[in-house]
Image (cartoon, helix red, strand yellow):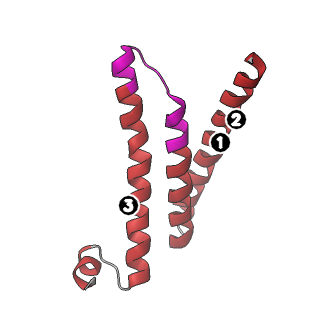
Amino acid sequence: MTEWLEKLLHVGSTTELLWVIFGLAAQLMFTARFLLQWIASERARDSVMPVAFWYFSLAGGVMLLAYALYRADPVFILGQALGVVIYARNLWLIYAKRRREA
């Protein structure tokens, strides 16, 4: 049943197919952050960075890092690992500022 999809995505097993589907979902999550930021900026008529941008970044980054680890791609792992740290730090800074202001 999944043979045509495995062939289309150039994978040789159901496990590989599931990881590629996961990787595609991760990339969609990561891309959604740009769409979110664009829509928020258009609505505000100003360049804005909603907090949700960082959540989408973190979720997409963690998912892509998991995919990169599965694929054992050191370049991809390094790129995603650094991003995950940066996205988490931005969320930490946002909530630390909110606590100080409360």
The residue to which callout 1 is attached is 88
The mark that comes first in sequence, 3 or 2, is 3
Q: Tags 3 and 2 in contact by the CB under 8 Å rule?
A: no
Q: Is residue 21 left or right of residue 75?
A: left
Q: Most extreme residue toward the front, as rendered?
A: 102
The residue to which callout 2 is attached is 92
Q: Is residue 78 left or right of residue 47?
A: right
Q: Position of residue 80 (x, y in %)?
A: 56, 53
> Residue at (50%, 71%) from the top-left corner?
71
> Residue at (50%, 58%) from the top-left corner?
64
Residue type beneath disc 2: Trp
Q: Residues within 10 Å of mark 2 (few under 14, many from 20)?
A: few
52, 5: nearer the viewer = 52
Q: Tags 2 and 1 in contact by the CB under 8 Å rule?
A: yes
What range is drawn magenta here? 40-56
- Mark 1 and mark 3: Cα distance apart in space: 22 Å
Question: Is 43 contained in the magenta span?
Answer: yes
